[in-house]
Amino acid sequence: MLSPMRLGVLGPAQGDLPALARGAQHLLDEGHAERVIYVAEDDALDRVVEGWAQRLVGANPTAGALFERAARCATATPEAIDAFVASERARLRLQVLMSLPPGQRTIEILDGRVALFVFDKAALDEEDIVAASLLVFGKSPEPLIKRVGPRTFFSPGPIGSDGGRALLDDGQGGVRIEVMNASGAVTAREIVGPPAAGSRLRVQGGTHG
């Protein structure tokens, strides 16, 4: 049996890296997301992650430079060594922040369902769509949750819209979608599949297709 998953989703940043960083931080710290996927074709999240990593461990935060960084501990105090270990653990935690491969897609399994993540849903062919129960895409001017037969199409919308960030949670049966705006307020909710298939709750002016 698969373990429950809380998966964060970030929409395109549209050049606003500080807002993207706030969204990622919120999904990790407040949403307790185990992983976060950025559904865009740019490198904005990679740049955010690199900046965070540099602040944690220095100008070269790559794994290849780990031994060079660790060498500083040879004559360090116990407190400095503890700080080094804590910063490296924090750097490793950043690996849960993922961008879509350029021009490609990624697949997750949520509540036993195939969830397909892509920037532009127009790039999907019939075979892709048939295999998936949940299709998550980034290219949309606003948040969207739309059922088409047995499938649900979902976009968090771009950063700075009524959405921009979302949580997918399969811990209570079905897949619960929560769309959030820049302040972290939930603007739309829906459950895909049991126990509440077909139900939809709209709050605080959320936008649906």
Image (spheres, rainbow, N blue to C red):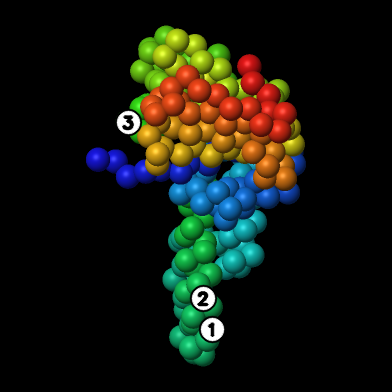
Residue contact between numbered discs 1 and 3, judged by CB atoms under 8 Å: no
Query: In screen coordinates, is 188 left or right of 62?
Result: right
Residue 58 seen in the figure = yes
Q: Dot 3 surroundings within 10 Å: few (below 14), some, or many (20 or more)?
A: some
Q: Quadrant of residue 184?
A: top right
Q: Position of residue 137 (x, y in %)?
A: 55, 25
Report the amino acid beneath label 3. Gly
Report the amino acid beneath label 1. Ala
Q: Calculate the distance from the C-alpha at mark 1 to the C-alpha at mark 3.
A: 45 Å
Q: Calculate the distance from the C-alpha at mark 2 to the C-alpha at mark 3.
A: 40 Å
Q: Quadrant of the C terminus?
A: top right
Quickly name the residue at label 1: 80
Q: Residue at x 68, y 42 (%)?
A: 185
The first of marks 2 and 3 along the sequence is 2
Q: Position of residue 206 (x, y in %)?
A: 68, 28
Eye-nearest disc, 1 or 3: 3
Quickly name the residue at label 2: 84
Q: Residue at x 49, y 67 (%)?
A: 88
Quickly name the residue at label 3: 112
Residue contact between numbered discs 2 and 1, judged by CB atoms under 8 Å: yes
Q: Nearer the viewer, residue 18 or 61?
A: 18
Q: Quadrant of residue 64?
A: bottom left
Q: Position of residue 151 (x, y in %)?
A: 44, 17
Q: Secondary structure at mark 3?
A: loop
Q: Residue at x 40, y 41 (%)?
A: 171
Q: Calculate the distance from the C-alpha at mark 2 to the C-alpha at mark 1.
A: 6 Å
